[in-house]
Amino acid sequence: MAVEQRGIELVSQQERYGRPRDLLFLWSGTTLGIFTLVYGTVVVSLGLSFPQAVAAIVIGNLLSFPLVGLTSLQGPAVGTSTMAVSRAAYGPKGARALGFFGWLNMVGFEAGGMVLITFAALALLDKAGVHDQGIGLKVAVILVAALIQLVLPLVGHAAVMKAQKYFTWVFVAMFAIMAVLIGPKVEITASGGADFATFTGAVALVMSCGGLSWAPLGSDYSRYLPQNASRKAVFGYAALGGFVPYVLLMTLGAAVATVVKDAGDPISGLPGALPGWFTVPYLLLAMVTLFAVNTTDLYSSGLNLQAAGINVKRWVAVVADLVICVAVTYVAVMSDSFNTMLNTFLGLLIIWLAPWAGVYLSDWLRRRGSYDGPALFDESPASPYWGHGGIRWSGMAAQIIGMIAAGLCINSVAFVGWISQAMGGADFSIFAGAIVAGITYLALELVLKRRPALQTAPDAA
């Protein structure tokens, strides 16, 4: 229970512990949550039939969760966080911008979780007879939830890994009971459904709230594994740990949406599909699963804040992050605009996440998974990752071009890109962003690699 002092600094071989299969429990405990269930209901709310929703859920998760496995491979090999490894592609200063985006990513999900925790707690208080719920009570609930939320991320990696292992078994049992209770009421029909454009939007939604959004956290939790840990096991356990719960719970959420039309509201809507006696256990389950998800988010957001160039200790970053999260939660709770904020946030995630994934994986392939750990933290021109002025412009240019490509192909609540409009609303933003950024990065690296040879050719002659 000692507070972990290490941030993104390299983990020495003497401090490594654990086995690859620990990642299975980490990601299962993180993804077995009410949020995942709600994502399934949102897919159906787009207009998809149940069979279409299941297809979108399987395809979206099959395409996205391998990213979590791939970004977990660098942890044992290098011994640092995912965003710190990004310095190889973007340079030590260029990667700060991506670290900041990664931090915003985590804060958004943390705030979403805190809002739902607050709503669930208020619903429990209402059932206990506390009906007068003014601003003072809401603020008190938010603060108490924040103090509870602070414990595990503050203590650190070992506590998070241990807690998520036990959470997994509890969550599996509770969601199995939910499936049994809801199953007989489900109305599975192939009638109706959405067009191809809407289906692509559903796949993009599944990917953005699933493996794509979790990918920047991969090495944050695998970095303590021994360097000789099996690469296949690291990849497999990390990918399956998220893929299986997401497919099962999102499918359950889609099934619930056939029973309760406002199932997208996990506090006042979704419980309508459950027997009255299970409402209180469900609300408690909702709160605990949301605390579990936020634990993973909050731990990594502290690391991302350091990767963004904020020179503070990890525990200070965690506390500061939670303070900001509480402020965002207060605004969301008081404005009653949670659903709109969440949908806008998920849509805009794609703009930077997809290109980042394309650049990160292209750099990993180009280097054949080999990184110089100490050099990643060398912020001097002597570093092989320095680039020009601390920025590797091949990575930054590829990121910007990929973001433009993703923006042109997106169909979100915030806006619809020109290419998406021309294609009848189809959303290929993730594929466009990742592929364009990845190819651009490799092409620019090839040009830069050949340039010195062209310059020295006359001298050699």
Image (spheres, rainbow, N blue to C red):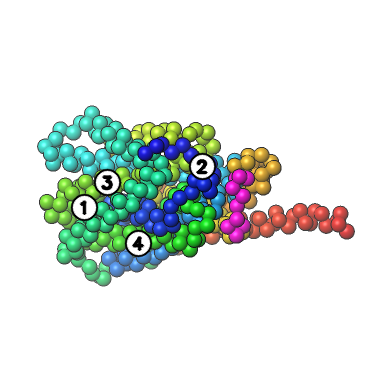
- Disc 2 is placed on an element classified as loop
Above-or-below relation of 411 to 91: below
Q: What is the distance, in whole Å, between disc 4 and disc 3 at their CAs?
A: 20 Å
Q: What is the distance, in whole Å, between disc 4 and disc 2 at their CAs?
A: 29 Å
Label 1 or label 2, whichever comes before in sequence order: 2
Q: Residue at x 34, y 67 (%)?
A: 55
Amino acid type at circle 2 is Ile
* Image quadrant in which you'd find residue 367: bottom right
Circle 3 residues within 10 Å: few <14, some 14–19, many ≥20? some
Q: Name the residue that disc number 1 marks.
A: 270
Label 1 or label 4, whichever comes before in sequence order: 4
Q: Is 369 one of the magenta-colored residues?
A: yes
The residue closer to the viewer here, 11 or 423, is: 11
Above-or-below relation of 107 to 236: above
Q: What is the distance, in whole Å, between disc 1 and disc 2 at their CAs?
A: 39 Å
* Image quadrant in which you'd find residue 291: top left
The residue closer to the viewer here, 326 or 385, is: 385
Q: Name the residue that disc number 2 marks.
A: 8
Which mark's residue is nearer the viewer, 4 or 2? 2
Q: Name the residue that disc number 4 marks.
A: 244
The residue closer to the viewer here, 190 or 133, is: 133
Label 4 or label 2, whichever comes before in sequence order: 2
Amino acid type at circle 4 is Val
Q: What is the distance, in whole Å, between disc 1 and disc 4 at their CAs?
A: 22 Å
- Disc 4 is placed on an element classified as helix
Q: Quadrant of the C terminus?
A: bottom right
Residue 362 spot, x, y in % from top left: 57, 58
